[in-house]
Image (cartoon, coloured by chain):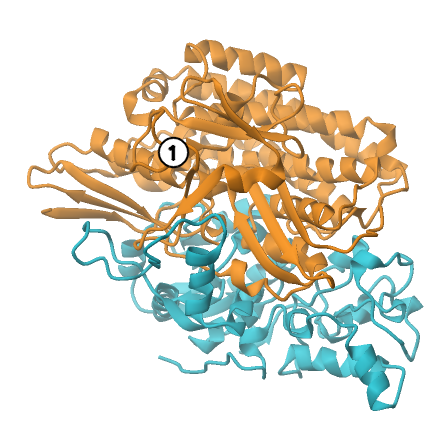
Amino acid sequence: MSDKPKIALYWCSSCGGCEESVIDLSESLLELNTRAEIVFWPVALDARRKDLEALGSGEIDVSLINGAIRLEEQAHMARLLRQKSKKVVAHGTCAHLGGIVGLGNFHSAQTLLKRAFREVPTVKNADGILPGESTEGSEPAPKLSGLTEKVMALDQMIEVDYTIPGCPPPPELMGEALWALLEGKLPKKGFVFGDRKALCDTCPLRESRPEKIRVKEFRRVHETEWDSEKCFLPQGLICLGPATRGGCGSRCIGANMPCRGCFGPLDSVADHGAAMLSFIASMIDGDREDTIRRITDTIPDPGGLFYRYSAPCSILGGKNRTKP
Amino acid sequence: MTRRIVIDPITRLEGHGKIDIQLDSKGQVARAFFQVPDFKGFEKFCEGRAAEEMPTLTQKICGVCPTAHHIASVKALDALFNVAPPEAAKKIRELMHTAFIYEDHLLHFFYLGGPDLLVDTGGKGLGRNIFGVIGKLGEKVGKQVIEIRKRVRGLNILISGSPLYPVCGLPGGVSKPVSEKERTGIKEIAADALRFARQCLDIFEKEVLSDPEFSNLMHSDAFSLRTYYMGMVDEKNCVSFYDGEIRIVDPEGAEFEKFVAKDYINHLEERVDTWSYMKTLYLKNVGWHGLRDGKKNGLYRVGPLARLNAAEGMATPLAQQEYERMVDASGGKPFHSTLAYHWARLIEVLFAAERMNEIACDETLTDSRIRTMPAQSPNEGVGICEAPRGTLIHHYETDKRAIIQKLNLLVATQNNAAAISLSVEKAARAFIKAGKVSDGVLNRIEMAYRAYDPCMACATH
């Protein structure tokens, strides 16, 4: 038996990007494997579900779980990992806030299925069958896990101790969080790694942001040529930097594109999109209702823009706090 | 049915999957199912979103091949707005995409599928992984793999903002030019990438091809399917990742169909099963006649081996030499061995490295004209590129304000869905005798899908 701390890494409804954020630890991944015993990590190791089930309650020191909860089976795996682990970390934006897959909460689960399996122009499905439907009487196919009613962030399903934000978290932040956890330097429960300040505060374009920003219209990137040396906001381009936690290394800004908010809200903020909307409201150059409406109408798809990563945790709905 | 063997979860691939093998009363395989329990609904929840956000939104389908989605998406936007990017922008996109395919293929060979070939565990499980590979090949090679992937991903940070999720794609171009100073750094990385690509083929020769056990497996019926093959080709019918026409060859290697992006719908069709969220693509003009290979069924394959089979050669000299070696060893094209995907993948690594060098050495890469502004009202656009795992298609319809009304996504691994299922079932039948299974036998079955480097998040999206 190894006396090294045991860790597990698992994905729920995810894209695999958070696994890459661990592989991107590069040489430090070898150090991780030396300093800890990785007991479960499907992307890289051949351990199975039965190996996980065979572990004792609380036997894993830290489990990092990425991805949102979209399938019943993912909810089951999250609960299983919670039971086996002393500490659980929500790893990446989907586990933290629901993420892109959380945009699914603007529709019912059934609507999502119907579009993909019955309606897209390439599908041929005369009987209109959907995955997960009963197969009784036909071939002895395996059962398929159903979708949850809504997409959930990890803490809407199980108790979460800490969060590493980002889509995906940068390797530097992953390293910082992992070493702290493995060395037992545990932050207080609920801690979200990353900066305490907004991205705006450390943005390389910060100097060019005026004290007061006023715009007469919002513009879209495909129809605008902007000054890459200047803050996006006074140029009418929406950037979620003012309402988003820093710590990403301003990577989108570095490629001359605005922030889309993957690090989520600051500590004191419950609803990321509402925080950004309130900032946007302060930018509108006009007092009359029709002027304000004309300006806000220049923002296409505010729901999808301001809640791109956080719909399941928002006041818009889709909030499902039913715990098992 | 008397007994089931379930591999849950299947491992060393991107995303979720299970294999459910059903044995008859004599312990022989009756059926084997490759199931994907994952679904997100991108084709619905992207409706109503702004078109220009699609390259950064749809790429979240996959954190392993996001750059491919970014490229297919931005090409769909070019078509949607009917706008042609300036030459420098096309080169920047192609460089980013090629660099990504290079490092992603290495990820598969050293971290995911390659451990099956490189690590002899005597049939016992847990050593088949990157740590086992480093143990086998030595720390020096291990650190070279890590280092070159890090540097090539660094190249993409420079171009696109992130090692993982690029953000630079815009309809008609990219958001950021490449400076002359940056080009100097890119040239150094590309030169080192080429050296390491050649080393990878040496490793493959020494550690894999010269192993008689691998050679037997590669040429065995258990790992062979006679299928159609599909991939993108340039005007000389050479493999192309970024731009070109889609070519399909039949199981004898004759050209069956060739089409441009916007016509994809006339050639490909997909079917639904109740027991998996992965839809199965097949050739519309051959039709679906069940899970079997051969010329009479529309089952086809994509990805590295399929690209090499569907093309007539490689566009760069060193890759062409290696291509000819592989064709000689196969006894003539098409090469139907599923395990030859590993070999083809490394030939593509070499091609990617040579192409990166060509682009990096091109002075026009640093031209400051990187955008053509859209002038037309949008309507509909299709974008295609080759993802590491196969042909990737994004199709958008918008209103006049460029708000997405409908979209259809045919994602690389979906093309291989039927081939993966059939390969797994065939391997199960070959290796499970009288109901006896061991870790080694189950891994052989897993080798049947790992060779494809499948991405289940893509396949279900």
In the foreground, B292 or B127: B292
Quarter where residue B49 is shown? bottom right
Number of other residues with Cα within 10 Å of mark 1, as a class: few under 14, some 14 to 19, many 20 or more: many
Which amino acid type is shown beneath numbered disc 1? Leu
| Callout 1 secondary element | loop
Residue A217 at x, y percent in the picture: 86, 73
Residue at 69% in and 50% down: B166
Residue at 77% in and 29% down: B359
In the foreground, A70 or B431: A70
Question: For mark 1, what is the residue?
Answer: B299
Residue B149 at x, y percent in the picture: 63, 38
Residue B227 at x, y percent in the picture: 39, 26
Chain B, colour shown = orange
Residue B188 at x, y percent in the picture: 77, 30
Chain coloured cyan here: A
Residue B360 versus residue B276 in the image, above or below: above
Residue B196 can be seen, yes or no: no
